Amino acid sequence: MKNLFFLFLASVLILSIYCNTPAKVADNDLSRNTTIVQTQEVMPLPMGMSLFSMNLYKEISNLFKGRNVCLSPVSLNLAIGMVYSGARTITAQEMSAVLKFNPDLNAFRSEFRNYLNSLKFIGNDELVDFNLANRIFIEKTYDVLEQYRSDMNTYFDGAFEEVDFVQEADMVETYINNWVKLMTKDRILNLIPRGTLNAATSMVLVNALYIKAKWKLPFKNENTREKPFQVNQTEQISTKFMTQRQPNIKYAHLENADAIELDYTTDKLSLLIMLPKESTSENIHSLVPNSTEYLTILESLQPQKVYMEIPKFKIESSFSLVDILKEMGMRSAFAGADFSGISGRRDLFISAILQKVFFEVDEEGTEAAAATAIVMTRTAYVSDDRTEYKQFIANHPFIFILKENSNNTPLFIGQYVKP
């Protein structure tokens, strides 16, 4: 859309419970002071989220070799954090190890509240259109602990809404999809596929995030040029490149890559583009930075005169994340789970984790959208002076990270490999 740089995100996490004979849980197992056996270094929540984000995106990039793809790790984190708060025993231990969440659940909830507030603070900036929402759609006949309800309201902004999965699962699917569509301003459609929900569904936890922001230094339409993009050693495709030269762009020249950080009119967001020197559609998955490399890139950025050529692009991605998270070590959440901190019973498991993302870059900014849903189910069922400027010619596959600048956590991570 002209004159706009949009970003949309929505995530849905579906926990389903099938319980013929739910196991009874002792009262002391339900204490909200539960501390998980620590199996990894405890780190501040934003740092842990960044580490998990890069780990997860490496898995996604490897799975989508040679394809354009974009993920919203923060949407997943915001949705799955609500579930983690009710996890216990081995389920909580595995989630903590994979997601890098604090094993002390009280500390985690407090950190989560602070981080959520820092994200919501972005919405106070009149230079950005920002919407963030968590919603828990719960089967009207399913009882959850009052403490869990209180925690969701206090720490997660997780408003409960009673629905009828037992008799009207198809209608509820449509209702939730329409809510996501509204929260993301029509950019994410049909997040939950038809037939995903049924009478055994107990909860659907949804995160939706919408951002619209303009570049601080917009690209001029008249400077957009048709040029070749080198997909790999044998394939070139012509596409439209936005071009611009600026005297004060954050730029880093590293051993194996160059990087720039582009600002928006709001100082709360920015877009990092990493251009590996020898990237192709076949190897870009192996060049995704880990969290340490990501921080090194950020620390290396310095203001420079930069001439830029960046392709206009649009990416739409859809994920089912269950298998990926299982391979990363989060197994019991999907079978034999202990989410007794939610209901007081071990009768829930995650049956689906769904995400859709939309991300588009043009001369004035970016348009992006994402939604994440977690389904829980019951267990029974160019000029002469160009040489004066650093060159950043993104004419071969590159990686991009849209981040919030308070903690530098990635909101979106993607790769562009082919027009």
Image (cartoon, rainbow, N blue to C red):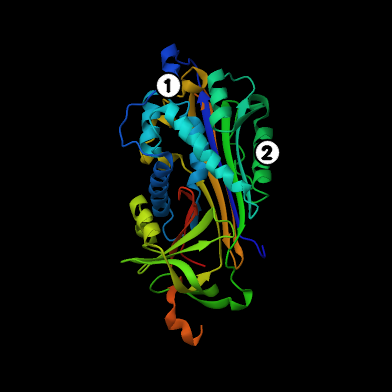
Lower sequence index among marks 2 and 1: 1
Residue 273, position as x, y percentages in the image:
45, 62
Residue 108 visible to an observer of this rendering: yes
| Label 2 Cα neighbours within 10 Å, binned few <14 / some 14-19 / many ≥20 | some
Q: Residue farthest to the bottom?
A: 384
Residue 166 picture location, percent across and down? 64, 24
Q: Which residue is mark 2?
A: 174
* Picture layout, residue 142 above or below residue 116: above
* Label 1: element kind: loop
Could you tell whether 94 is left or right of 227 in the image?
left
Relative to 113, is 127 above or below?
below
Under mark 1, the amino acid is: Asn
Which disc number belongs to residue 289?
Answer: none
Name the quarter where the N terminus is drawn. bottom right
Of residues 115 and 347, the one drawn nearer to the viewer in this rendering: 115
Residue 407 at x, y percent in the picture:
46, 47
State the residue in front, 222 or 110: 110
Residue receiving disc 1? 33
**Image position of 187 (left or right of 286):** right
Residue type at mark 2? Thr
